[in-house]
Each structure stands twice: as structure tokens, then as C-alpha cells.
Image (cartoon, coloured by chain):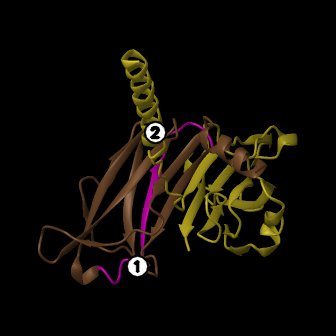
Amino acid sequence: MYRSIILGLLLCSNVLAHEMTPTYPKWKVSYIEGVESTTMEMFNRRSDVEWYEIGVFDKEWKPVPFVTSYKILNLKYLSQVKFKVYISSSNVDKAEYICSTSKLRGDSMMVSSKICSRFK
Amino acid sequence: MKKLITAGLILLLTGCSLFSSKVQAGNIDITGTVQSRCIINTDTVGAYGNPNAYTLTTTAADGGQKPIVRVDVSLADSYYAQISYPTEFSSSPSLSDTVAWTGSVNSVQTSDAGMSGYQAASTTTGSMRQYGLTVAGTTWFDVASAATYGGGQNKPFPGGSYKAVVLAECIAQ
């Protein structure tokens, strides 16, 4: 009970946080033949970061070609964004991870955050 | 008598309407989904102290500050946390000599006793330490970092601003 309360308070607290869901996205057939898509959602609670880079990778962490509106997303502090990622049907089986990485422009020793969801 | 029956009917209908509105209110559903998620937080921003001309360190006794990264996971066994200490400056004055880097990552606080084995179970690859987040909750990691200039000859760092980056990753299992 206390754990849930503490976790809830922590999740609601005003800290520098980076969040991306879902953890396990699925590819869906898109309106373009031979192309599949998935929808991801990001929330930026890092006041020190406004830009996030999106990447799709295979099991060996090699980049897999993909298309999205902006590969580097401008996400203002405390804002949320849903974005679609498109991939060729021939690459669907190769894609293992989809990641968002914070782009830093700070003055001190900073923490770069990276969250990767996995296609299962 | 008619008035009595009318009044009785009114009361009956009013009661029915109240009862039915209660029933309707009881049928409103609240739905929710608990989905797995990972949140990376920077609780404390790090800073380098400069105890001598050739060392930059996050050790508090030397004027530095260790960055503290907090990782929240809502479901067990869904993510790995990977924390890496820096092995280069992201920005610095021009450096003509080599910099020797050392560092460490430690799980310093947890929200659940079941997480106490995280540090012992973690694995390292170079500067990166990987933790299996087997329990839902929060884990705090601190990162120590030190840079020594001069390739073992303790040369003074050139004057200027030095920045380095700690990488905190949450990778779905």
C-alpha cells in the first residue's frame, strides 16, 4: 500500500523526467501499401531538454530505416506528443527497438536519458 | 380520498425516480489500464570539483557532486536500466594530452526491499552498468566520475569550462 502511494507521489512530483509508451508497441498495416506503422507517445517533464531524437534499431542495435514526421522532436517542457513511425513491411521483422534519446544543451554535467520500447 | 391517493402516487413516483437515478449513477463505469512504463528522472545534476590542477571529480569532499538518476518502473520484469559514467568531455577547452577516466555506478536507494540485490546482480560492460528491474518501483542510482589529465604525468587541465554526460537508459526486456 505504502509502496503504491510513494510511487504515485514520485510519478506526480515535479522532477526532470522523460517518459515514452507503450513499452511493447505493435506494427499495424498503414494506408500505404507495403508500409506498416506504429504510434508512440512521449511526455517531457525535463525542463532542461526540449529535443528528443527517435531511432529504430535491430537486435544488434544497428539502425533500421524508418520514417516519421520529425526524427528530432521538439517537445516543450510538460508537453505530450503522439507520433507515428512508418517502416517498410520488409523491415518489420528486423526492427527490435524504438528509442527516444534526449538531446542536451546544458551548462553543467548532464544526464542524457534514453528510453527504448521493444517489438515482441 | 382522491387527494390521498394522488399524494401517494406522487410520493411513489418521486421515490421511483430517485431510485432509478441512483441505479443509473451506479452504472457509470470507470475504466483504467495499467500499462508498463519506465520513467527516467534526474534528481540531482552532477558537478565536477577541482581538488588539484590535474583532476576533475564528482567526489563531494573535493567540491564535486554526484549526479543522481532515478528510474521508476510500473511493472516488474519489463525493463533493464543501463547507466554509464562519462568517458569523454562533451565540451572542453582544446586538450593536447590524454585524459584518464574512472567512474562507477551504484544503486544507492530503492523503494522496495526486494530491490536490495540489484547492485550485486548487475553486470558491467566498459563504463556501462546494467540492472534488471525485477520489481516494480523506484531505484536511485548515483554516478561517480573522475578525469585526470596528462597521461599519468599530472599535467594541469587548461583553464575553461568542462562538461560531460551521464547516459541513463531504460531498455524494454
| Kind of residue sitting beneath label 2 | Ala
Above or below, comparing residue A44 to residue B12 in the picture: below
C-alpha separation, residue under disc 2 versus residue under disc 1: 50 Å
Residue B142 in the image: x percent, y percent? 75, 52
User: Would you say residue B36 is visible in this rendering?
Assistant: yes
Above or below, comparing residue A29 to residue A42 in the picture: below
Of helix, strand and loop, which mostly describes the magenta segment?
A: loop
Above or below, comparing residue A110 to residue A60 in the picture: above
Q: Which dot, 2 or 1, sits closer to the camera?
A: 2
At 57% from the left and 53% from the top, the residue drawn is B39
- Image position of A106 (left or right of B70): left
Above or below, comparing residue B22 to residue A119 in the picture: above
Which residue is under mark 2?
Answer: B25
Report the quarter where the C terminus of chain B lies. Answer: bottom right
Q: What tint does the image give chain B?
A: yellow
Q: What tint does the image give chain A?
A: brown
- Image position of B75 (left or right of B24): right
User: Circle 2 — which element?
Assistant: helix
Residue B154 in the image: x percent, y percent? 78, 54
| Kind of residue sitting beneath label 1 | Asp
Instruction: Work out whether disc 2 and disc 1 sit on a shared chain.
Output: no
Which residue is under mark 1?
Answer: A58
Q: Which residues are magenta?
A: A92-109
User: Would you say residue B54 is visible in this rendering?
Assistant: no
Residue B138 in the image: x percent, y percent? 70, 54
- Pointer 2 chain: B
At 84% from the left and 61% from the top, the residue drawn is B113
Camera-nearest residue between A83 and B5: B5
Count residues near mark 2 (Cα–Cα under 10 Å), then give few for <14, some for 14-19, many for 20+. few
Residue A78 in the image: x percent, y percent? 46, 36
Seen as rendered, the residue at the extreme front is B1
At 51% from the left and 58% from the top, the residue drawn is A114
